[in-house]
Image: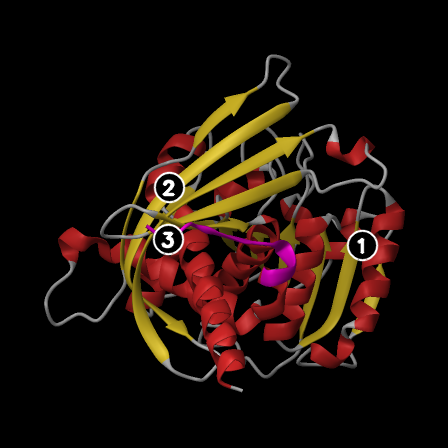
Amino acid sequence: MASPIFISNDDVKSVLTWSLVNESTEEAFKSVVVGKEKLTKDQDQPFANQSGRTMTSTHDEKVWLFNMAAYIGNHKVTLEDGNRKAFGTLACKSLTWSEFTKELNPPMPTILGSICLLDERTGQLQCVMDGTLITAWRTASASVIATKYLYFGRKNINASDGVTLAIIGCGVQGGSHALGMCTEFNVNEIRLWNRTGSKAVKLSAELDKARKTFVNPNLKVTVCSTVEECVTNADIIVTCTFMDKPLLHLDMLKEDVHINAVGSYNDHISELSQDIYDVASVYVDYWTGAKTELTGLKTNFVCEVGEVILSGKCPEKGISVFQSLGMAVEDAAVGQAVFQNLKNKKQTKSRL
């Protein structure tokens, strides 16, 4: 019996691209809608089986462990050689959140993750993969895919037209979202706000260095002093904070704005005010998670993002919100794509 391998953060980084992550995330969105029980023989779609996440804390609740397990079948992976193959992936992602990592010298990310890939037939452990970078990228990718369909899918929106993007919260997730959005969409201006202003300044410098990878390398980067300044007339907004009180209010927003609500403080509904939820069309990644983690949210839930992808029916106007929870199938799909591309890369090198 072969021993499982360990895939380090550097290994992951060597093959991780936005096209790889976006493809895998879109497959994950579709899979939770189709489901094996709804799959017909003539459908060539991914399908999934996943449950909600479990949460365990230490005695003082300063460290939390989240476990997320899933199976995703018939999902497509594009390899570095250009071939696109279908896989079935059984996986479990463990995620920790700690108050102590930021006190270290040098500090570590607040959120750390690891992904275990298992053989779908035998259950044998194939690999343990550092999932910290994948977590950051796939979360941002989920917002990218949601924005692609919920905003750019509207009939009155031309994807080639430049947009104004606002990032609220400039930590790891804010940075990943900024890079992912600017790599995928034509962003004329990106505005940054963070409670600690130095983080926004730091992210601004990082974006300047990455310009050549953006759809619009000449975009304007603005560091804002207030949330209102950051979001005024913005077309797309991303909130990535741990704030326990609303940051966004309805009177700050333009009509037809799209919001990706990603941050969390004890629940996932603390960043946007109730008056936004009163008028917005809210979309989720998967109903299982929404029914357990969004029980306190009073709003108009429309459907899962995957339903929009498969049906082509997106909002025509008004405020849309993607209420991001994160799904195990995203980690499974991206983890498999990384694993297969690393194997493909190793085999290619061995032939040279």
| Distance from the alpha carbon under mark 1 to that under mark 3 | 56 Å
Q: Which corner quadrant of the image does residue 181 belong to?
A: bottom right
Give percent across and percent down for residue 9. 63, 55
| Distance from the alpha carbon under mark 2 to that under mark 1 | 40 Å
Please tell me which residue lies in front, 295 or 154: 295
Q: Is residue 9 magenta?
A: yes
Q: Left or right? Give the position of 140 relative to 340.
A: right
Residue plotted at (52% across, 76% down) = 157
Residue type beneath disc 2: Ala
Q: Which label sits in the foreground, 3 or 2?
A: 3
User: Which secondary structure, mark 2?
Assistant: strand
Question: Is residue 333 depicted above or below 101 in this figure?
Answer: below
Looking at the image, the residue that sits furthest to the front is 1
> Magenta segment range?
1-11
Q: Which label sits in the foreground, 1 or 3?
A: 3
User: Which secondary structure, mark 1?
Assistant: helix
Name the residue that disc number 2 marks. Answer: 69
Give percent across and percent down for residue 328. 41, 46
Q: Earlier in the sequence, mark 1 or mark 3?
A: 3
Name the residue that disc number 3 marks. Answer: 2
User: Which secondary structure, mark 3?
Assistant: loop
| Distance from the alpha carbon under mark 3 to that under mark 2 | 23 Å
**Mark 1 packing: few (<14 Cα in 10 Å), some, or many (20+)?**
some
Residue plotted at (78% across, 57% down) = 192
Residue type beneath disc 1: Glu
Q: Left or right? Give the position of 184 relative to 332.
A: right
Name the residue that disc number 1 marks. Answer: 229
**Mark 2 packing: few (<14 Cα in 10 Å), some, or many (20+)?**
many
Residue plotted at (46% across, 60% down) = 334
Looking at the image, the residue that sits furthest to the left is 41
Give the number of the disc on residue 317. none
